[in-house]
Each structure stands twice: as C-alpha cells, then as structure tokens.
Image (tube, grey):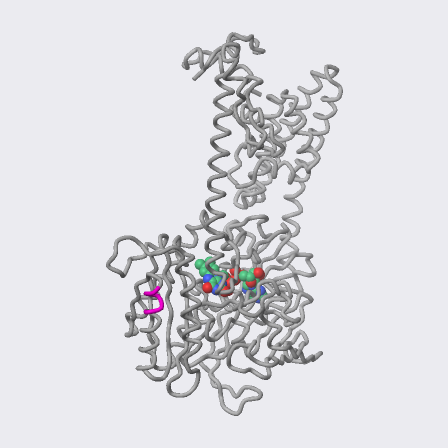
Amino acid sequence: MNTVADAFVAADSGTDAPRLREIPYNYTSFSDREIVIRLLGADMWRLLQELRGERRTGRSARMLFEVLGDVWVVDRNPYLQDDLLDNPKRQVLFVDALRHRLREVDRRRQHGVGADAERDAKVARLIAAAGAAVDRFATSFAETAELRRRTRRVLARHTDRGNIAFDGLARVSHVTDATDWRVEYPFVVLHPDTEDEVRGLVEGCIELGLTIIPRGGGTGYTGGAIPLDARSAVINTEKLERLSDVERVVLRGHAEATPTIDCGAGVVTRRVIDAAERAGLVFAVDPTSADASCIGGNVAVNAGGKKAVLWGTALDNLVSWRMVTPDAQWLEVTRTDHNLGKIHDAKQATFELAWLAADGRTMTRRETLVIPGSAFRKAGLGKDVTDKFLAGLPGVQKEGCDGLVTSARFVLHRMPPAVRTVCLEFFGLARESVPAIVEIKDHVDALPKSGAARVLLAGLEHLDERYVKAVGYATKAKRHGRPRMVLMGDIVGDDDAAVAKAASAVVRIANARGAEGFVAVSADARRKFWLDRARTAAIARHTNAFKVNEDVVIPLPRLADYTDGIERINIEFSLANKLRLADALTAFLAARRCRPRGRPTARRGRRRKSSRPRSTRRANSSPPCAHAGRTSPTGSTRRSPLCRTARSSCRGSAS
Ligand SMILES: Cc1cc2nc3c(=O)[nH]c(=O)nc-3n(C[C@H](O)[C@H](O)[C@H](O)COP(=O)(O)OP(=O)(O)OC[C@H]3O[C@@H](n4cnc5c(N)ncnc54)[C@H](O)[C@@H]3O)c2cc1C
C-alpha cells in the first residue's frame, strides 16, 4: 500500500499507533483506531495492525475501510440516519452495497488462498467481523424504528407527543456540553412542559431501559450532560421556567421574613439575577455562564461565581428544592436552620427530606439529615469538587446522578448601599502578581464585619493573561500593551467613606506589586468594569485550544503555582508537539530521499500517463528505504544517520 500514510507508518516504529485517517468520510474527531475498535472490536484492530505490518494490505484494505467509513458516517450523522429510516428502499440499497464490497474483498482473498494460509485466516476473520458489523448496522434501523414507536407510546402518557424528539437537530444539539466532548448521540430528547410531567417521564424511561441525563443550559465543564450510551434520554429542562416574584418567607428557625425566590429548573440564571436586582436584592449564584446556564444545572454542579466570596455557592443559598429520584419518586429537601450565610460557617446544617407519592403531595417517607457545617468544604476552598457526596445531601453537586432537580427556592441578599468596584491591572509575572489576591482578601477580611463601618468583599474575579488577550481587553492604564493579569472586585459596606478608604487601600496593595488600579463608583461605571468578565463567557467557545477544560477550585494562596503550572504544561506540550512534527517530517522526507532508483515495480499492465516529473513518479511508486524511521534512544523517530553516510547507496532523490 504505497500511500503517503504508509510512509508515515514506516517512519513510526514506536509502540503508539500513528493517528492515521485511512477510513474515508470520517469528519469526526475519532481516529481510525477508535472507529475500528468500536465497529469491529479491539482484537480486529490488532489483527489489522499485524496485516499492516506485513505490508500487503492494498486494495482489499481500502475496500474494507470504505465499508467501515460508510457505516461510521451514518452512525455519526443523525440526519443521514433519519433519511435512511424514512426511505426503506434506500436503506436496502445502501446495505446491499456494503455487503457487495465485502464479498469483493472475500473474493480477492479466495483468489490468493494457499499462498499464505496464516495471513489468509487473518483476513477471513477480519471480513467476518466486518460482515457482522454490517449485519448489526442493517438490523439497527428496524430496532431503532421499533424503539422510537414504543418510546412515543410510553412517554406520550406523560407529556405532549411534540415534546418527544428523535430528529437530527434535537439529537445533535444534545450530544455535548461546554467540554465539546462527544461520545454518543442521545436516542431521544425530552422537553417536558411542566414540572409535574417529569416524574412520569423518568418512570417511562426506566420502563424503556433508557439512561436518563438531566440537562439545563449545557454549559457544564465536567461532561455531566453528555450521553455515554446510545440508549440515552436527555431530559431538557429549559421549558421549566416558572419564576416566582421575590417572596418574603419566614424560614424555619427564623423570626423575621427573608426574601426568597422560587425558580423552575429551566430558568436561565441571568433571569433570577435580574429579578432580584429589580427588587433591590442580590441572587448570589452568578457563574460567568449566567446568560446560558439554568437553575437546575446550578444546583446540580453547586455553581458559584464572583459573589461566592461573600455569599458562597448554590449550596449556601438554597432553602429547598424538589427533585425526582432515579426510581421515579418525588423528593423534597428543605433546609430547616438556614444561617443566611456560608454553610460551612454554621455549626451544623439540618435538612428535612420528604418522599412523596406519584401525586406529588402524599408523603410516603421522611428523614432528617444533620450535617456538620465543616463537612461541606475543605478549609480554604470555595467548593470541594473532590467530594460529590456532600454527606449524602441529595441533588446538590451530584451532576444529575441521583435525580433530576425540577425547582429550587433560594435566599436573596441585600447589597449594602455603598459599593466600589476596583479594577487592578498587573503587568508583571504571575508569581509576582497573584499574591496580591491573597493580600487584598486578607486586608478586607481584617476590616470590621459588623456595625456601621463594616466593609466586605462582595465579588472577586481574576482574568489571567490568556483571557485578557482573548477578550481583547482594553487596558485602562496609560502604559502600552495588555496587562498580564486583571483583578476585579466589589468592595461594599454601609458607610461610603469606609468603603472608599478600603478601595484606596486595595489599590495601594496592588501598586506595591507593580499594578495600576482604578475605582468605579457609579452603577454604570461599575457595570462597564464587569463587562470584560462577562465577555469571557462569550469567547469560551473559541478558547478550547488553550483551555484546560476542567472544573477546578484552587486555594487562593496556590493560585500563582497553579497559573505557573498550567503555563508550564502549555509550553511543554506545545514544544513536544512541534518536536514530534519535526521528527515525523524529517523521517518522512528521509524516506522519500532514500528510495532506491530504478527498482522494478510490482505494477502490471498499462501505465497511466502522469503529468508529474518522472523522478517523482518513480519515488512514489517504490517502497521507502529501510534506513528510514529508526527510533532514537530517546524514542523519537529520526532519519537514521546511516542514510547520510550511505547516501550513495540510497540512490535516487525525489526531492
Ligand atoms: C464560560 C463559562 C463560565 C463558567 N463560569 C462558571 C463560574 O463562574 N462558576 C461555576 O460554578 N461554574 C461556571 N461554569 C460552569 C457551568 O456553567 C455551571 O456549572 C452551570 O451551573 C451549569 O449549568 P447548566 O444549566 O448549563 O448545566 P448543564 O451543563 O446542562 O448540566 C451540568 C450538569 O448538571 C446536570 N443537570 C443539569 N440540570 C439538572 C437538573 N435539573 N437536575 C439534575 N441535574 C441537572 C447535568 O446532568 C450535568 O451533569 C462556567 C461555564 C462556562 C461555559
């Protein structure tokens, strides 16, 4: 198989299989290896590699890859699936064509039987596995059609038929989240109209054997909303957008009413922030993704944001929530001793769990959970992403694994009247600038926290160098160039003079680390300062190339180490990639340079005319020099020095 790719195979004598793309029509990020393993199994990939090693995989291999490519392209394209499902005749023709090609491969195999019995047996196994894959592919259409019929019948008992979506657009839109990771398309996407429908849908999915995936805005960074199983039902909560007015409720254990808001799971976070603001209050859950994320998702990942520094994350602000458990029961969770602050500051937190019958009202079981406040967080962390269990508290930070949250009630806060927003631009190295964050927080923490002169840090956000660049940050300082780090913070209190003094002190702390500081006083100026932070959400989709897409929580004192560490990973990977590319190219070019001149070709019959120079044609039709592709002691593949010394014996240079 004298392809360009072949030369790369020859050049890659390491243990890692090269990322080749010989399977045609593959526009996905899956490699040939992954496709073969998925369609034929890992054994067949090994077999294919052995045959490849024998370097006699030619036209038959190409035909086999075409069959796999055809199956794969339909497998990964819901629109093509719909088309074939709607056109049984086309379906039959398509499958017949696949089988015809496999028969051709087998015919070629039989033609050569006897020459090499061992190899022949391997090829036969490969053809049999491909045949089985085509059979599975053929029967999958009838199975899919039948399961769709059954799904419609079962789930239409609980929601409108129009809310049960199998179409390509619905499935494509729910294959991934902000991670951009794709594994399986969901089998069906459900869009319940009301909270009440959810329990029945969960029950129906259980009956149908479908894996259930709750989904809000799909902005999650942990891949929790991504289907891993082809038989998955994504329950999209976006239509559950009931939002109460701000309601003053006397919470259990409190004498006075507290402002709260009750939200359907599908309410977009920004709408709750706005509703609170209109009432002169603050909704503390404000992830940068607030324009797209939903309340159910916020609870399920325990989302925080810039205000978490003062009021904590979703967990700290929840009063009660309603959910459907994976065994289709209603469960209501109510916190009965809310401290109206950070949960870990409370000695303990008490939650009442009430399971309700299918009618959503009759209580069937009750349980009380008393959890020490300290159990919710590791010291110094705003959120402990390593502890999903959270002492068994249902729903929160469980990423939809222990049920689907259908609605939630949160406390709202009153922002003190005096507010200053500081924007600090750091131009030095990260390790010199980042400690300012801790210094500023320590400084404000040391100021009075009660009485008329209290001063609080109500929001804090840092943009590192890459984000500063990505958002096209307009430098406020008169210097040239962009800052390497930007820190924004809201300093609040009841006394304007005390807040102004604190803001100036914060700027001075930053100045001492080579930063320039700016203070916004009016609401409009403050909003403009925060706009750059909001822009980071919009550019996030363009930033996958430089982002480590993980949900990380870092203790502030270690932020500089983290920033440096990530930068180091960036540089190391970038250099390693470039070196690999250079090595592979060197080996490839060496292989072309070292091809012997005038070696007889195996090609029989009439030659096709080529417009290319004769030397190029000759070089391309002969196997690469055996000197190419030696592995260096460091494991990198380089052109062997032998080629250089024995250049005269490696006659003929195409380049
Ligand atoms: C640009 C950007 C900025 C971000 N900034 C922040 C930030 O500042 N702070 C922060 O904490 N996070 C942040 N995130 C992460 C993410 O936006 C939040 O975690 C958000 O809360 C996810 O909500 P969602 O509705 O998009 O959830 P989805 O992505 O739809 O789902 C996330 C997880 O929750 C589950 N889930 C969704 N809805 C429900 C439900 N109703 N019941 C049960 N489980 C459910 C899903 O199955 C999945 O496991 C950011 C993400 C992006 C893309």
Report if residue 209 lies within the magenta region.
Answer: no
Left or right: where 494 falls relative to 642? left
| Residue appearing at x 34%, y 79% in the figure | 499
Residue farthest toward the bottom in the current orientation of the protein:
255
Judge whether residue 293 can be spotted in this image.
no
| 577 on left or right of 418 | right
In this view, 521 is above or below 437: below
Range shown magenta: 508-512
Residue 505 in the image, given as x and y percentages of width and height: 34, 73
The quarter of the displayed image where residue 538 is located:
bottom left
Location of residue 176 with respect to 50 vertically, above or below: below
Q: Is 270 above or below relative to 464?
A: below
Q: How many numbered badges does the structure rendering display? A: 0
Tell me where residue 645 appears, x and y as whole percent: 51, 15
Relative height, residue 372 to residue 90 (above, below): below
The x, y position of residue 226, in whole percent, is 57, 54
For this orientation, the residue located farthest to the left is 478
Decide if residue 181 is in sight here.
yes
Who's the residue at 52% across and 23% down the image? 639
Quadrant for the C terminus in the image: top left
Which of 381/188 is in front? 381
Task: State the residue in front, 369 or 382.
Answer: 382
